Image: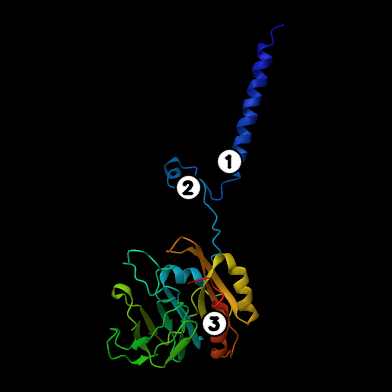
Amino acid sequence: MDNSPFLASISGLLLVVVYIGSLGSNDMNVFGSVSDDADNAAEQPVQQTRSNNGTTGAAKDVFDTHAFNAGGSAQNLFILIPNEGHHGPGEEDEARYLNQPFVPETVTISPGTNVVWFNGDVGHEHNIAISSDGSGSPSPLYQTGEFSEFDARNYTFSEMGDFSYADTVEYENGFVMRGNITVTDDDTSQQGTTGSNPQTIGLLMVPTEDLAQHTQELQSRDLVIDSTHNFSDLREGDEQTLVVWKAPENSDTSTIIADLAEVSQQFPYS
């Protein structure tokens, strides 16, 4: 008896099963849709990778744009002077963690907002000079005076307008740390934040590997974590995290500064 037709049928059936199975296995890795149009197929990726960088809300916006809109309800805005932020991009050996001398560099606030510069730059003093003409002139509107690591200085912006600020301390290769502040009565809600707009908001940079520990410590001091963004630093590519935090209503700024100092002293930056 000739079994050739029977064997051919079995072989064909097996090929169909294998083909269908291979289609099913490929679908498990497809996160986005694929167009049926052959002309568009080349323009759309078959697979879209899922983000796994802990990104939420305002923290990513600050990292990407270097800017933050504090909105009309913010009474206190903490700007971070990040560790090694005094190094310039033109240096032969890149020493910065991120390409912002202040985090954020540019802010929009309402009249009466108290801006606090918190010094997270280990081993370095800073003196912030504020100018009202946007030129960073040698005759500033106000100077904070030099303050050391884990300390802070502040200035309340009562009048509307555009202001620039700069660190007067000289660093390598003449690099100058600069930032800008716009004071407006346009009551815009806070950029990227969640929930109700807090009266006090600020940023920190922490090592990602210890993020859970440090956020827990911040929360134990009644600071609420608004958002986070993980990034690879410019020094050695290690992962760091920007944290946007909020403080409860009527929180005392001196207590917040002391709390930030206690948490920051545990960071391994040097």
Q: Any mark on residue 45, and which?
A: 2
The residue carrying mark 3 is 261
Q: Any mark on residue 26, and which?
A: 1
Give the Cα separation between the discs numbered 2 and 3: 46 Å
Amino acid found under the numbered disc labelled 3:
Ala
**Looking at the image, is 211 positioned above or below residue 198?**
above
Point out the frontmost of discs 2 and 3: 3
Q: Name the residue nearer the viewer: 94 or 139.
A: 94
Left of 138 or right of it: where is 50? right
Residue 92 visible at all: yes
Which residue lies at the image location 40% right of the left edge and 72% below the top edge? Answer: 100
Q: Name the residue nearer the viewer: 7 or 251.
A: 251
Which residue lies at the image location 38% right of the left edge and 83% below the top edge? Answer: 182
Does dot 1 land on a helix, a strand or a loop? helix
Residue 197 visible at all: no
Q: Quadrant of residue 84?
A: bottom left
User: How many tags in the picture?
Assistant: 3
Does dot 2 land on a helix, a strand or a loop? loop
Give the Cα separation between the discs numbered 1 and 2: 14 Å
Does dot 3 land on a helix, a strand or a loop? helix
Q: Name the residue nearer the viewer: 197 or 270.
A: 270
